Image (cartoon, grey):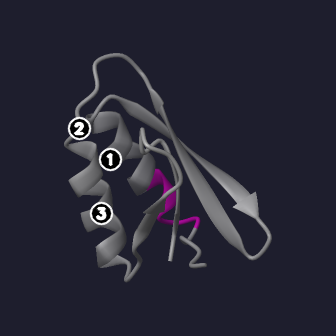
Amino acid sequence: MSVLSMLEVPKLKKLAEQYGYSIHIHDACGGQAFSLEEDGETSNDIYPALEEFFKEHHMTIRFFDEKKHNFSVK
């Protein structure tokens, strides 16, 4: 499991806000998990934006649920 630098977290949070979401980071043994929370009007465009964000950090998203609100990165 990959770990996103804490210096990059504010950038990720700002990205999520642009699409109507809050993003929460959860520490796990040796890694991180993320969850999205809807904050009003949302856009499905967040998913390609998240994939691009993590791709720039040499990471790939793995969603845990059908709604794609819970994920980790590899």
Of the two numbered discs 2 and 1 in the rendering, the one whose residue sits closer to the viewer: 2
- Residue at which label 1 appears: 15
| SS at badge 3 | helix
- Residue at which label 2 appears: 44
The spot of residue 70 in percent (x, y) is 53, 47
Tag on residue 51? 3
Residue 50 drawn above or below residue 21: below
In whole angstroms, how far apart are the C-alphas of marks 1 and 3? 11 Å
Residue for point 40% across, 32% down? 21
| SS at badge 1 | helix
Q: Amino acid at mark 1?
A: Leu
Residue 45 drawn above or below residue 43: below
Q: Which quadrant does the N terminus fall into?
A: bottom right
Q: Earlier in the sequence, mark 2 or mark 1?
A: 1
Q: Is residue 25 left or right of residue 73?
A: right
Using the rendered view, name the quadrant where residue 35 is placed.
top right
The spot of residue 31 in percent (x, y) is 68, 71
| SS at badge 2 | loop
